[in-house]
Amino acid sequence: MSTYEAAGVDIEAGERAVALMKDKVARSRRPEVVDDASGFAGLFDASALLRYRRPLLASSTDGVGTKVMIAQRYGKHDTIGIDLVGMVLDDLVVCGAEPLFMTDYIACGKLVPERVAEIVGGVAEGCRLAGAALVGGETAEHPGAMGPDEYDLAGAGTGVVEAAAMLGPDRVAAGDVVLALASSGVHSNGYSLVRHVLREASLSLDTVLPELDRPLGEELLEPTRIYSLDCLELARAVDVHAYAHITGGGIENNLSRSLPAGLDALLDRSSWTPPAVFGVLAGHGKIAQRDMDRTFNLGIGMAAVVAPDVADAAIRLLAGRGLDAWVLGEIVPGTGQARYR
């Protein structure tokens, strides 16, 4: 007799996973969330937007990429959801939007309730750190298409910004200062190259290298720093003109997206020393500087373009929030590119 369970889908495991993640999801709740008894949809009270004169909704969708393969190999699943939130919601804050809510999607070869609960717990914690609510999601079992220990996750987020307060290239002016906001590590980009280096250099995730004070697997799984609340507070306190989320493409490519056509960001490479993990990858992988530049964040997870007279105050404010920041460069006449001196 053919059954869904015989085909590899365990409905009861899915129900156990939902029960296990319930309390973790509740920690990300915002007061605007409205319960839907059916559970088919997440509800958010839009009357909360009435405080805006012209509210613009912002949305973003992303995944974690092949960093999930490191999590699977190392057997650590409780922080990969934080990475997802960082990838999705920190894109929203670039335009000045406050993240409101998020949904997630997990596809797995075999639904292990405890593992799914760990993953979703990370998503909920990331939402809490971003000030957003996790209002729903979906877990799909794909036997035959994915191995029993394999999974992937993606998500979508929604935020809101007052139209008149939206940040971006049109606010950037010559003489502005570019601030670097420190990353927590590799974050969630470049892991196809990371895995290539591990394979070619025969590096185990359990290896403790002299340059690092913990196993390589733990270093590579350090969760992505979530900047949403820091960036929103900074924009409320000082004259911020633009942000750039440093993700795939590196510092230059992402910062260029936040520049107008007639201005460049002139950056000082000597203003910081990239964290040791990037030296480990470059050394063991024999990666050229140009490839490092366009693949990794190199220790800078977000950049802020601010008026020159508020740069020092901005750095002090961020330091008070436990976030290292420094002057990375300045805005000068040019062709809309971020470049090093």
Image (cartoon, helix red, strand yellow):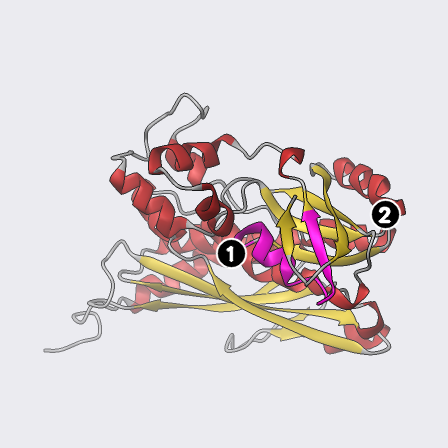
Residue 323 location, x and y as percent? 69, 39
Query: Element under label 1?
Result: loop
Residue in the image at 33% along x and 58% along y: 151
- Classify 10 Å Cα crowding around label 2: few (below 14), some (14-19), many (20 and above): some
Q: Where residue 201 sits: x, y (%)?
A: 27, 35
Residue bearing the label numbered 1: 249
Q: In the image, which residues are magenta?
A: 247-266
Which residue is at the far left? 1
Query: Callout 1, which amino acid?
Result: Gly
Residue 38 image position (x, y, % from top left): 52, 78
- Side of 209 where 333 appears, left or right: right
Does residue 180 show up magenta in the picture?
A: no
Image quadrant assignment for residue 95:
bottom right
Is residue 275 among what the camera can see? Answer: yes
| 41 left or right of 232 in image | left
Label disc, if present, on residue 308 of the rendered structure: 2
Q: Earlier in the sequence, mark 1 or mark 2?
A: 1
Considering depth in this image, is 110 or 6 the residue closer to the camera? 110
**Of helix, strand and loop, which one carries label 2?**
helix
Q: Is residue 254 magenta?
A: yes
Residue at point 51%, 56% (across, down): 249
CB atoms at circles 1 and 2 under 8 Å apart? Answer: no
- For the C terminus, give its image quadrant: top right
In the picture, the disc for residue 59 is none
Position of residue 179 measured from the top left corner of the image (x, y, whole percent)? 73, 45
Q: Residue at x 36, y 37 (%)?
A: 286
